[in-house]
Every structure is written in structure tokens, then in C-alpha cells.
Amino acid sequence: MTDFNRRHLLAGAAAAAAAAVTGLRPSMINAAVPQAGMQAPGFYRYKVGSYECTSINDGARTFPMPGKFVANLSKDEALAAGAAAYMPKGMVTVPFNPQLVNTGSKLVLIDTGNGIANFEASKGAVGRTLQNLQAAGVEAKNIDVVLLSHLHPDHTNGIRLADGALAFPNAEIMVPGKDWEFWTSEDNAAKAESNPMMKNYFANVKKTFAGLESKVTKYEWGKEVAPGITSIATPGHTPGHTSFAVASGDAKVLIQSDVTNIPEFFLRNPDWHVMFDNDAALAQETRHKFYDMAAAEKATVIGFHFTFPSVGHVEKDGAKYRLIPSAWNPTI
């Protein structure tokens, strides 16, 4: 019987390395293949009744963990959680995944990602939504509705191209009315002057939606905002933060937007407060309500900050929850 212990594996790796240095080829390698240096396009299709949905990967950002990434936890405890999730040492990785819903009559893009202007700035780490839509066979001009869950930059900046033109020129842009009211308030912006992150958020909304004010449709909670898509009140992350139920026939999925940031931290530990939450206590309450509902319904849950393709189920685990990613399905 072959012994696959660590010593033998390391010895094999050393032999391969030595062969590379000396120019000798290990006998099991038949041909040299150039390294690609890039990932494949990121899109994943799944069905909801008669609707075809597509998870579109906008990329993932890895950055040094801020001291208060988890606002109500010490940085050491947060770093330990990151290590337990096998994140790079001292770092945190946050993915971004807009969702496309093809109802048969409408193409609805839920959230737009970080925007193409951030693609070059991040060396391709984020801002990949347009190229991945194209890889999935979808032209930006054919998007009928851009449906925004809230007005944070990683959800809205994809509305614009690098030159400021509209990325989805024929789409109706829909925003939660409560979020629009909050982020376009000059009084609220003035109150945020001392908070650099919030100050940036207000400035970003002003820049992103400049000239679009009359073209934006404000929607309410508890309404069908597009065919088969109902808005769900999930405030806390922002005042008007919204999730969605996508239903067709007897099938339904819950698109949770940012009810939780990365699930390894904030779904597993729903009482932890991510630094991006506007009202952390309300966001915590919302997480429990939403995940209690999702677990009771055994609903499929789609998370904007879940690891791509961002599809799974949530189970209760005492006072906590755990995410069960759905198996990759090669057919639709």
C-alpha cells in the first residue's frame, strides 16, 4: 500500500523542485503548458421555477483587516476568526456577487458591483461585472432593470463606465426609497463630516447619481418591484437596506444582499457588528429575523458577500447559524 504520509509527500515535492532546477523532467510530466495567469469568467446559472438566474462575480477584495472590522470585538479575536477561516494572515477577503434574473420578459440585474473604473485600480480584483455578463452572453444594453438593494459603493458604482457614461443605458434604475431619502439628505451628509467612511459614502451617492435624479424610480418594501421579485425590509446595514424574494411557480430563493457581510464571520456569529453597518444593533436584529425565516423555510439563500457562486442554505446552530453551500450543478 502506498504511504501518503507528510514525509513522503514533502520528499516528492523536493524531488520535483530539484528536477526543475537541473532541467530534468519528472517522468510523469508529458508536456509543458504555459501558465494562464488569470481566472476563468465568473458566472453561474441556476433555475427558480421558469426563471433563469445567474450569479455574476464582480471579484473579491483582500485587504489588511481594519482594527474595528468587527466593531464589537477585539482585533485579536477577529484575526483569530480570519485564521480559522484560512484567510491570508492579517487579512480579510470580501467577495462581491450581483445577481441577474431572466424572467422571460425582463432582464433584472440586482446590484452592479464596484464598477469598471475600479477594475484597473484594483488590478482586476474587482469591477468584473460587465465582462462576466458578456461572458455569460448578456449585453449590458439589454438589461431592462437595475435593482439596487442599497446605496453603498460596491453595489452602485457599476452603474457608470470609467468615462461616466451609463453602463446600462436602457435600464430603469430602481432604489429603495428609504435609502434614497437618507443618502441624498444634505443634513445627514453634514452630520457625517467627522466620519471618513460615511463622508465618502455620501459623496459617492452624489457623484454616482448626478443627473439621474429624475430617472431613478424609488420603490417601497413589501412590493413586487419587478416580475416575481418582491422587496423585503432588512434595515440596519443601511436605513433602507433591502433583500428580495424571487419566486416563480412553486420555487423561491431569498437574495439577502448585505444582511450579513462575509458569512464566516457575521452569519456564523450574527451578534458581531461589521464596521460597514449604519445601525449595528438593528442590523443584528435583522440578521436573526431573516435567518430564522430562511432556516424555517429551508430556503435557498443568495449572498452578495458569500463565496462565489454565493448559493446555499442557512441552518440554525443554537444561537448561531451556519451556511451550507449548494453543490455546484453542471446542468441548469
Image: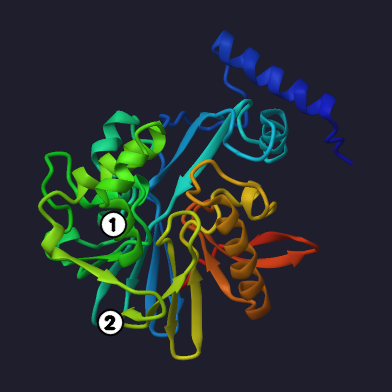
- Asked which quadrant contains residue 245, the reply is bottom left
- Position in image of residue 201 (x %, y %): 34, 42
Image position of 167 with respect to 22: above or below: below
Query: Which quadrant would the C terminus be assigned to in this image?
Result: bottom left
Residue at label 2? 104
Q: Residue drawn 30% across and 29% down?
A: 121
Left or right? Give the position of 308 relative to 26.
left
As drawn, which residue projects farthest toward the bottom? 249
Which class describes the residues within 10 Å of circle 1: few (<14), some (14-19), or many (20+)? Answer: many
Which secondary structure lies at badge 2? loop
Cα separation, mark 2 vs mark 1, equals 17 Å
- Position in image of residue 157 (x %, y %): 27, 47
Please name the amino acid that badge 1 sits on.
Leu
Which secondary structure lies at badge 1? helix
Q: Residue drawn 84% across and 24% down?
A: 7
Query: Which quadrant would the N terminus be assigned to in this image?
Result: top right
Which class describes the residues within 10 Å of circle 2: few (<14), some (14-19), or many (20+)? Answer: few
Q: In the rendered structure, which disc, 2 or 1, sits on the residue that comes first in sequence?
A: 2
